[in-house]
Image (tube, rainbow, N blue to C red):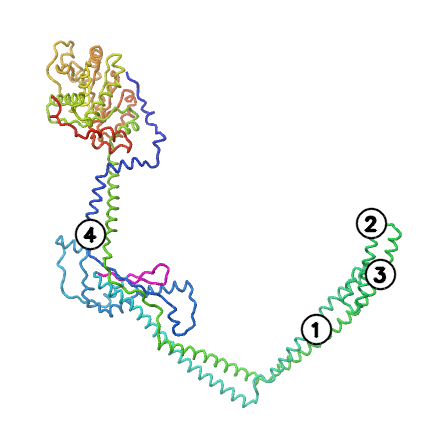
Amino acid sequence: MLEKNGFSEGLAPQPSDMKTIDLDRIFSLLRRQALVLGLCVGVMLVLATVYLTLAPRSYVSAGQILIDRNLEQVTGEAQTPTSATDLEAQVLNQIEVLRSSRVAKTVAEAENLMTDQDFLNPPPSFSQRVKSILGLGGAPSTERKQASLEDVVGMLRSHVQVDRMGRSSIIRVGYEAPTPELAQRIANAYGKALLQDQLNAELEATSAAADWLQQRLAEIGESQRQAILAIQNYREETGLTVGQDRSLTNQRIETLSTQLAEAQAETARLRALSSQLQNVVAAGPDGASTYVALLGSSLTDPSEIESLRNQVATLNSRMAQIEAAYGPDHPQLAALKGEKSALDGHIFALLQNLNAQYRTQLDIAQQQEAALRADIDAEGRSAGDISQEQVRLNELQQRSDALGALYNSYLTRYEEAVQRQSFPIPSVRIVTDAVLPDNPSSPRTVVILAAAIIAGAFAGVVLGALNEMRDRGFRTGTQVRKQLGLRFLGYVPKLQIDAKAAPAEQQRTVRALVQGALGSRIGRRWGAPFIEVLKTTRMVAQPIADRGTAVLGILSVLPGEGKSTFAHSLAEMLTASGARVLLIDADSGGDRLGTASRILPSQQGEWRRVAVTDHETGLVTLSASAPEAGGGDLSSLTMQKVLAEARGQFDHVIVDLPPLGPVIDALALLPFTDGAVLVAEWGRTPRRLLRSVLEREPELADYVIGVALNKVDLGTLPRFTDIEGLERFAYRTDNRAAPAVETAPR
C-alpha cells in the first residue's frame, strides 16, 4: 500500500496563510469578476446617459454683495469699530434677509413674475419626460399661466442660493432657472431688492426716530421752561442766591479738616516716640548706651551726641580687645567696665530728660486736636442751620440744569436723524453683477458619470462578492492542499465527449483523446495538462507497480463528476505505455462507460468469462455487476478473489468505484486496494461536502494518494489563481481551443 496522507496535519494553518489583507486574492477576485464589474459599470453609465439626455437643464447666475459699514461714514459720523463677532452677526442677518419672503416679494413685483411665462412654464422634469415617452403622461399645456404672489414667493425662495464667500463680508446671491437669461435677471433683481430694502429700512428707522425725538424735545423744552420760571419766582420770594452762605461754610470746614489731619499725624508721632523712651527708661541705666541713637531726634546738641557715640564705640572696642587678649579677669577690663557704667548713667539721664519733653509735647498736641474737632463740629452745626429755602432753591437749580443738558442731547440726536433721513446710505453694495451663464449647472455631467461609475463599481463588487460566495467548489490545487491536506495530482481539461453517444463510441473517443495527447497531435494548452495528470497518477503508483500489481481505486463524492472517464483514461494511458491493465467497472451509476461484448478465449476462470479484452490496445475490462464478479457486491468474497487473482496477472488494476456520497460500497472495497485517486469536478464539487466526508471517514484519507480536478476550463483557470501562480503561465504558449471529437484519431 502507498504511503498514507496526513489529513489532519495538512489542514493546520501556516503563518503565511494568516494575513489580514491578501492583495493577490483581491486582484484575482477582480480579474474573475471583471465581466460582472464591467456590465454593472456599463449599465450604470447607460442609465446615467439616459438621465443626462432626458433631465432638464438648469442655469445658475450669481452676483456678489459686500457688507461695508464704512459707507455710513460718508455723512461725517464718527467711525465705530466693529468686532469680528458683530461682523459675523451682520453677515448672517443679511443672509437671512435675502432668504426672507419680504425680499422675494419685492423681486416678484419688480420683475412681474406673476405673469412671466418663462418663469411659470419650466421645461418638464425627468420623471415627466419618462412618463411621456412611456405614454403615461399627458401632453404639456400651452395656455398662459398666472400665479398668485404667494406662490411666486415660494418658488423664488426654493430656488435662490445665498452663501457666504469664505470668512469674508461678501455674500454670493444666485438663482437657478431653466434659462440663462431668467437666472441672470432674477439674480440681479435680488441684489437690487436688497439695496432697496436697506434704504427702506433706513428711512423707516430714521423717520420713526425723528418723530419720537421731536416729541420728546417738545416735552423736555416745556419742562425746562417751567423749571427756569420756578427758580425765578422763588428767588423773588426769598431774596436768596444759589450757594451764597453754603460755599463759605464749606470752605471753613475744609480748612479745619486739613488742620485736624496734620494735628492727628503729629500726635501719633509724639505718642510713638514717648512710648519707645518710656520702655528704655523702664529698663534702667544698664545698657543705656545702646539707645544713644534716640537722642538724635531731640533738641540736644548734635556734636554732643556724636561724642557720646564715639565714646561708646571706643569703650566697646577696647573691652573686646582686652578680653580677647588677656581674658575676662584682667584688671584693665574691670576699669573699662567702670567707665562704661558711668557713660551709661550719663546717657540714661539724657534719655529721661528727653522723655519728659516728649510727654509735654504729646499733651499739647492732644489738646490742639481736641480744639480742632470742636471747631469742625461747630461749623457743621452752623451749616445745618441754613434755611430750607436755600436747599429748595438749589434743588430747583439742579433740576433746571439737568433738563437743559437732556434737551441739548436730544436736539443733537434729532438733527442727526433729520440728516440721515434726507441722505440715507445703505451698509451694503453690489461688487459683482450677475452674468449670463454659459454652461448649465445641472445636471452635472462629470459628477453624474463619476457617480455612475462608482455606483456601478460598487454594484459589481457586491455582485462579484456574491458570486464568489456562491462558488463553493475547488478551483485550484492550492485549495485542495490547504483545505483537504491531500496531494494534488493536476487539472483534467473538460473533454468533448458526446453524452448522448453510445458507450462504445464514448470509449473510442476517450482512447483517441489519450493517444492524441501522448502523440502531441493535440495542442499543449489542452493535451499537456490532461496527459500530465495521468502521468502523475502513474508516478505516484509506480512504487507499488515495481513490487507487484498496483490496485488503484477511482473515487468521487457525487455522481457525474467524470470519475469513470478519468478511470478509463488512466487505463488507456497505462495500456499505451505497455502495461497490463484490468479496468473494473464497480460503479452501477450512469457515469460508467460501456464495454465491448467479445470475450478473449485464452482467459480462464469464472470472472474471466465476463471480462472483455480490447484487441487493439489489450485493455481488459470487467463489470462488477456481473454474477461471476460478485453481482455488484463489492465487499463479497468473490470480488476479493477477483482482486487477489488479478494481482498475479496484471501490472495495474483500476477499480472505478461508486460515489462516496450516495452509497458506502467504495469504503468496503478500499481495504483491498493499494490506494485511491479522488476525482472532484472543477468548480462544482462543494468543498465543505468533500471535507465533511473526509472528516466523517478519517481512514479514507489514508487510502487517497491524490486529488484530480476534472472538467477544468483551462481558459478560465488563470483567473482563479494568484498573480504569480503557476497556472497563469503553464498553458499560455498554445492558445488553441480544446479539440473536438473529430480531430482526434480513431
Quick check: is 53 in the magenta stretch? no
Q: Earlier in the sequence, mark 3 or mark 1?
A: 1
Left or right: 127, with 250 as reference point = left
Quarter of the figure that contains the C terminus: top left
* Numbered tag placed on residue 51 in the rendering: 4
Q: Amino acid at mark 4?
A: Tyr
Q: Amino acid at mark 1?
A: Ala
Q: Earlier in the sequence, mark 2 or mark 3?
A: 2
Circles 1 and 2: CB atoms closer than 8 Å: no
Range drawn in magenta: 161-177
Q: Give 650 or 698, whichever is nearer the viewer.
A: 650
Neighbour tally class for label 4: few under 14, some 14-19, many 20 plus, Cα within 10 Å: some
Q: Amino acid at mark 2?
A: Ala
Return the residue at label 1: 263
Q: Is residue 559 visible?
A: no
Q: Secondary structure at mark 4?
A: helix
Q: Earlier in the sequence, mark 4 or mark 3?
A: 4
Left or right: 131, with 545 as reference point = left
* Numbered tag placed on residue 324 in the rendering: 2
Q: Amino acid at mark 3?
A: Leu
